[in-house]
Amino acid sequence: MITTISLNPSIDHTVYVDRFTPGGLNRVSDSHSVPAGKGINVALTAAALGVDAECIGFMYRDGSKQFEKRLMVNSTAYNFVWCEGSVRTNIKVFDRSTGAITEINEPGESVSEADLKRMSDLVTLHAENTDYLVLSGSLPPGCPPDYYRTLIQSVEGLGCRCILDADGERMRLGLEAAPFMIKPNLFELEMMAGRKLSGLSEVERAAREYVDMGVSLVAVSLGGKGAILMDADEAYYAHGLKVDVKSTVGAGDSMVAGLACGCMGEYSLEDTLRMGVACATARCMTEGNRVIDKAAYEALKGKVEIERLF
């Protein structure tokens, strides 16, 4: 079982424009809204690949029906800590001329100490019956920046492995609890390293620092250029696949899902990376309001080229 944690769910409203003009008039050619959040995205993708997956997290009365419907339709279990208020809305502006996405994200509703205690109890309850616990995404107002560290420490000894996909202080503090896997993107890894990283060798050296700190697996997503996955003994680079990109929203979450499924199946490091990149690529080929197609994922998996770095 893969259990994901979604502490700050959102309704992602994506608008498509032919050419985005900052400060000017932009006419929308198409749009869609989808109940999302990084944890929800990971759980839906894992379920689409045929792996038992569930999502737990905070949920708000206003807007919750859309989330429950999407999870149920896609055979994904869920359990929420219910809070008063409304689910936040994140706006994504997709520029068709460049493929660039401009994101405008709301902070979300504030949570209380009582809410955080209920969430910690829920995480501990589910951790006893799951193999991999995925902690990803932003934290809502009222949630301390070390909360991911707190949750990872709270499940120590319960038999599950933790995967952390966060940025900034959330990642820095979460690392203190030695998660099983982390998945920064290139920009996030540069922020962690405090320097610009040029070329695969520099990326690999920066990622290795976290393996030396006790992280078992480090995955670095490189956007259209592919990804790196390493442990203490070996490192692999997967070349990116050229496809017709319909949206990059959720690609990183899909990569996390693919990697987690690879770990669940006890695949080799090379094949686990292949699964992660195929998942992310399938996400890019999929309209934002749909879950990835497993057949498309399987076809892409066979096209991923892997290169051993050491």
Image (cartoon, rainbow, N blue to C red):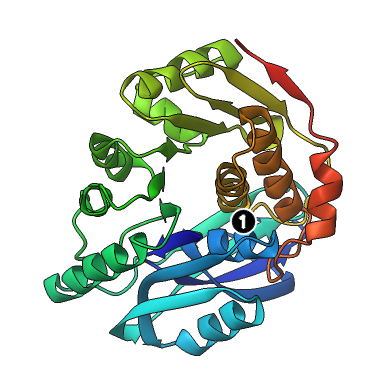
Q: Position of residue 104 (x, y in %)?
A: 48, 61
Quarter of the view holding residue 109 = bottom left
Q: Is residue 162 above or below residue 201?
A: below
Q: Position of residue 101 (x, y in %)?
A: 62, 52
Quarter of the view holding residue 292 = bottom right
Q: Name the quarter where the C terminus is drawn.
A: top right
Relative placement, left or right, of 173 versus 307 is: left
Disc tally is 1
**Front residue of this view, candidates 201 and 279:** 279
Q: Is residue 232 above or below residue 299?
A: above
Q: Position of residue 219 (x, y in %)?
A: 52, 33
- For this orientation, the residue located farthest to the left is 113
Residue at image coords 69%, 49%? 279
Whether residue 140 is visible, yes or no, is no
Quarter of the view holding residue 242 = top right
Please name the amino acid that badge 1 sits on.
Val
Residue at image coords 78%, 50%? 245
Residue matched to label 1: 249
Callout 1: helix, strand or loop?
loop
Q: Is residue 139 above or below residue 71?
A: above
Relative placement, left or right, of 186 versus 157 is: right
Residue at image coords 54%, 65%? 53
Residue at image coords 52%, 84%? 68
Whether residue 260 is visible, yes or no, is yes
**Front residue of this view, candidates 202 and 217:** 217
Q: Position of residue 87 (x, y in %)?
A: 41, 79
Answer few, some or many: residues within 10 Å of disc 1's Cα (few below 14, many 20 plus, some between 14 and 19): many
